[in-house]
Amino acid sequence: MNTIHNSNAQNHYLDLALFHRIDINLYPLFVAIFEQKSISSAALSLSISQSAASHALQRLRLQLNDEVFVRHGNKMLPTPFAERIYPVIKTALLSIQNISQQKQNFDPSLIKTLKIAIHDEIEPLIFPKLIDHFQGIDPDIQFRSIKLNRKTIQNDLTTQQIDFVFDLEHNLAENIAFNRLVTDRYVICTQQTEVTKHIYQSAPHIGVSSRRAGVLLEDVYLTQNNVSRHVFLRCQHYSTALQILEQNPFAMLTLPKTILEHLFYAENLKIHELPFHFPQIHIGLFSNDDLSENLRYQFLKQEIITLFT
């Protein structure tokens, strides 16, 4: 029964009487599971629960009279039949999508969800403004702030696990676009009243990173200036570092000025410019260029860019 026939008659004759038994809504789930090899990931990209996705998969199996996907370890792998029908279903869904979007203006009530991957320290700069703006468009939008994982940005955007990424500018694949939104610079926070190059090198420093190990970005820039420093504490949050500075009269923290402006710090802490050159840093929006024809996606992207520029 699970055979794709190629006769001209079957390719060109549309039997409308069959469609009352066909649930077309199951096929986006088929494509999502095929591409992501995971029911939970597919459910996330379709903004449905994992339970709903599992029940829909059972209905799809009955409809196609095939297992469609079988579990192998922690992955859902397609059956030979699913391998054969995937390109046909993907092409059909793309055709339906393109037809539905022709000569239409996007209805903001169709946004439903907005999923953004973002670093903890950048979140306060972005999310209050973002939520205030989009709730003015549609108060029923559900927002999700997802912890940024730079190793999976490309895959997460391509598979639509997330809509957008806010992060520092860096190179990714050709289909991942970047738009600069915020330009920032590094400053020094310390109790000390003066900061020279010599004082900076002699002081104990605090580094902030969510990673367990690895070189900090400011240390890359320091190396370019032939400057070395001693980091006595590496912690995960700038707010923690600022509390340590309040207790330590000699310690220093090097951080982006815009992030500092959104944090509370004690009155005895002073802000100094760097005694050497650091390049500006750019925070912006990473997006999936493959969705350039998707009206919802382009509406969201343009709203975000306009909001922050």
Image (cartoon, rainbow, N blue to C red):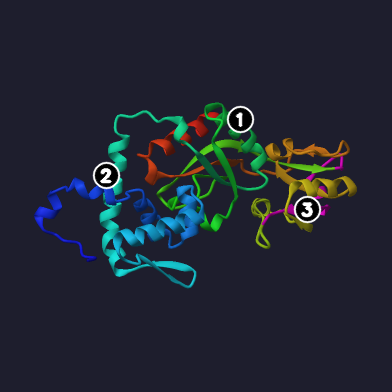
Say whether disc 2 or disc 3 marks the residue closer to the N-terminus. 2
Q: Nearer the viewer, residue 22 or 254?
A: 22
Which residue matches tag 2?
95
Residue type at tag 1: Asp
Range of the magenta residues? 191-210
Residue type at tag 2: Ser
Which residue matches tag 1?
132
The residue shown at (54%, 58%) is 151
Residue 287 position within the rendered picture, expressed as x and y whole percent measured from the top left: 46, 44
User: What kind of element bears circle 2?
Assistant: helix
Q: Which residue is most to the left?
A: 8
The residue shown at (16%, 61%) is 5
Q: Answer whether labels 1 and 3 touch (C-beta < 8 Å).
A: no
Q: Which residue is most to the top?
A: 136
Say if the magenta span includes residue 197: yes
Distance (Cα) linking label 2 and label 3? 55 Å
Distance (Cα) linking label 1 and label 3? 34 Å
Distance (Cα) linking label 2 and label 1? 35 Å
| Rendered view: 249 above or below 308 | below
The residue shown at (55%, 44%) is 116
User: What kind of element bears circle 3?
Assistant: strand
